[in-house]
Amino acid sequence: MSEHYPRIRRYSLYPEGRYLSIRECVSITFYLRRSHPELMQAVMHCLDVYQRAVEPQVLGMYVDEEGEWRDLDDKGWEFIRKELLHPGGANLHLSGASEELSAYEFAYRGRAPEDVEAGESSLLVVRLPTEFLEEHGPGRVRELALELAAGLPFDSGHAGLSFLYPEAVLGMSESICDDAFRYPGLDMPDSSVSLDIGTRLKGAYWLTFLGQRVLGELGGVAGLRARLHSPGTTVQAMGDERVVVTLGEWPEAGDGAQGRGLPVYCELARVLEPWLYVFPRRWHGFTREDMRRWERRFLD
């Protein structure tokens, strides 16, 4: 176990064997109110950036049009290329070559123009195992997040520690409900947030990316800096209308059982509270009160 986060490994038993189903990882996420045709070139660039960053690790599997995992061979790369070039939208999910739950992942949901007009956002998520963080250090992970962000017209984004599990498998979120409250710095993955997040923010994270609307209403970079006073918190401009807030050198999970809170995350959450996303849906095993308690874990 790292001093910054727990080591989480949960296994599920199936007739064919025992498989890793839940673990911790580093997740980098961006929400973009842009349609896929506007994003395809930027996403292609992000895929190249990610692959270079994780070498010699390689993406070895992908989800095909039937929703089945396949080996990422020449046929698979042709599918990826065609999907990215499709003008009506794209849905990509690539992972490491291991049959175990790989924390090397690149996922993208590019919305059709009419879906963006209806309020949905495109979504880009890349993930890394915490072993990558430990080997290369938090500075390298932050550099990767900034390199990805530089070419994306994001409305918001975040990077930090997260649980990793197959979202579509019933019961996964229920099994980590207690840990979700014990470790407030471990995010809960939820791709459905992109359906209605708009220009709002999912929360306060190790790296929190703010787009033009929220930054403008905060009074710009200077206005945001004036509200944040914790040592180790930095506010870095990304051009004239975007910014990234960094909360310390390392991402932190906290630990409620050990009395290790995350006061710097609480400070940022209080500043961003008027723009925070409110979850309209519930994760399996979470009551409505659980959902409110989790989304306000840095506020109450």
Image (cartoon, rainbow, N blue to C red):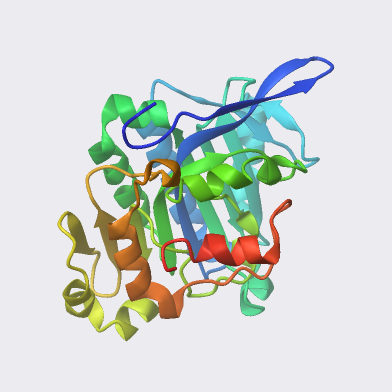
| Quadrant of residue 233 within the rendered picture | bottom left
On screen, 115 above or below 165? below
Quadrant of the rendering where the C terminus is positioned: bottom left
Question: From the viewer's perspective, is 220 left or right of 79?
Answer: left
* Residue shown at the point (68%, 62%) measured from the top left: 88
Image vertical order of residue 35 relative to residue 253, above or below: below
Residue occupying the point 47% across, 36% down? 25
Visible in this render: residue 37?
A: no
x%, y% of residue 270?
35, 72
Q: Quarter-wise, where is residue 3 in the image? A: top left
From the viewer's perspective, is 165 left or right of 55? right
Q: Position of residue 29 (x, y in %)?
A: 47, 53
Q: Which residue: 28% across, 61% down? A: 244
Q: Residue at horizontal 59%, vertical 45%?
A: 178
Q: Nearer the viewer, residue 221 or 8?
A: 8
Residue 75 in the image: state x and y as whole percent.
67, 28
Look at the image and tell me in which quarter the N terminus lies.
top left
- Going by the image, does 140 lie left or right of 109? left
* Residue 225 image point, x, y percent: 18, 72
Residue at the top extreme, as displayed: 17
Q: Quadrant of the rendered structure where residue 118 is?
A: bottom right
